[in-house]
Amino acid sequence: MTNEAGTGSAQGDRPAAHDDPDRLDDPGWTRHHEKREVTTSPLGDRLPPWYPRALIYTALTVASLVLLRVTIYLLRDLLLMLMVALFLSFAMEPAVNWLADRGWRRGAATGLVFVVVLLGGALLTYAMVDLVISETSRLVDDAPRYVRDTTDWVNRRFNTEVTSDDLVSQIETYQGDLSTMATNVGGRVVTLSAAAVGALFRLLTIGLFAFYLTADGPKFRRTICSRLPPDRQRMVLDLWELAIAKTGGYLYSRIVLAALCTIFSWVAMEVLGVPYALALALWMGVLSQFVPVIGTYLAGALPILIALLNAPIAALALLIFFTVYQQLENYLFAPRVTARTMNIHAAVAFGSVIAGASLIGPVGALLALPVAAIVQAFLSAFLQRHEVVTSELTAVSMSQGDEDDLRGPGGMGDLGEELWNDPAGASRGETPSGEFFSRMLRRAVERRRHPHSPDPQSDSDPPAR
């Protein structure tokens, strides 16, 4: 009895063979239970057969991710320069393509555009450096006179007896300290030169990458597409063309608005007698256009301060001019210039700049708006929209311009009805970007109308084989 109980317990209450003598003659029953006894073990119950392989794959994945993170960290400067060069090539490609269509060799066209960009940057840098040095020296020299004039005005206006002797003596002491710093600047030339050489090397690296990406753009894209299937090739080329259209449109619209702001500001400051009118106008034009929302106010602070040091009435007049011009730009110039290039909501633009600056610093702030424009155009074309239910929370009063934007097929927003009816041009620009936008719009609308049909091909797509 004891042996039988022990045997039954050890084998999971399975009846032993000797309990039923008839089963001893059944070879199938014997082979079945012998197999169960061989394959069943405590270790097999705890570890599935796939566990060692999964453990190895997990370890390899973690090691690969760590190695990738370390590699990206070590190459972060090079990757950042490559990203800047890529967006710079996006911005230059429309001008290079325009010259290439008129008979220029692509390398020569890229070189010409590059020279124009370098000369413009050098001119702006020289003007701003000369302005900062001259005005700082002038402000330091005239500071005691400004203090005495301000003190005399306060005493006359409020019948007080404020003395400025102590403050003037402190300013003169600071003037001596500034002179001492100027004489000791020679000892820091080595450090400044090293920093300048490093910055120059980065600029040359970015310029070299941007030149080759632009001059050899078709070859570069052909190399990438040769590694992809045809449907992926079309998607990559469409996205590439979208990036060129949006980045180039952003840059050229900013240049046009900056030129308008520079011209109007220069005329106003010349009339008001503000010194360094041209340099201040360039400062105003560049900073006001490439820093969204608050750029105009930041740029206008310096001209107003310099005008205030010369004539308070001129500073007040300049403040009024900047306020009026900002309204003219917002409601007259900017809508007509950016309607065909890039139209981003002010809150989105400001938030994208803050996000870009937080991620990769000043470079991220400069690249944030083109990236936001590319993402916005991509989402507008490929995300499905639905009719909004009627509610007080969604009731808005739209201007005629807003209604025109929403009138396109399927509510495609800023792509709109014009591209639908004019598929050959980029908003009447007759460029490949216009063909791309209209093709992308037609595909999105056809997918919306026929969600279960295959991806329709536009007139410009090659026939399916």
Image: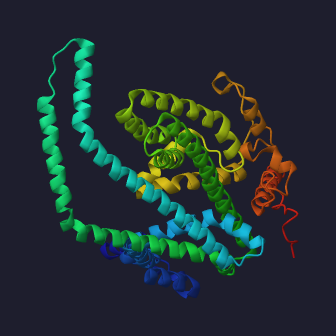
Total numbered labels placed on residues in the image? 0
- x, y percentage for residue 92? 62, 65
Question: What is the quadrant of residue 109 in the picture?
Answer: bottom right
Looking at the image, is 98 positioned above or below residue 338? below
Seen at 88% across and 71% down, the residue is 463
From the top left corner, tell me how far across and down residue 144 is, in percent. 21, 36
Q: Tell me if 444 is positioned left or right of 242 in this view.
A: right
* Towards the viewer: 86 or 264: 264
Which residue is farthest top?
159
User: Which residue is found at the position 17% from the left and 39% from the top?
Assistant: 171
Identify the coloring.
Answer: rainbow
Q: Quadrant of residue 141?
A: top left
Can residue 412 be seen here?
Answer: yes
Q: Is 399 rendered above or below residue 293?
A: above
Viewer-proximal residue among 134 and 365: 134
Is 424 on the left-hand or right-hand side of 178? right
Image position, residue 40 (x, y; %): 43, 78
Q: Nearer the viewer, residue 60 or 375?
A: 375
- Examine the rendered structure and indicate whether residue 308 appears above or below residue 260: above
Q: In this image, 144 relative to 270: left or right?
A: left
Q: Point out the image quarter for the C terminus.
A: bottom right
Q: Can the viewer see residue 15?
A: no
Q: Residue at x 75, y 47 (%)?
A: 415
Q: Where, by quadrant of the figure, is residue 115 drawn? A: bottom right
Q: Please identify the quadrant where the N terminus is shown.
A: bottom left
**Residue 36: image x %, image y %?**
48, 80
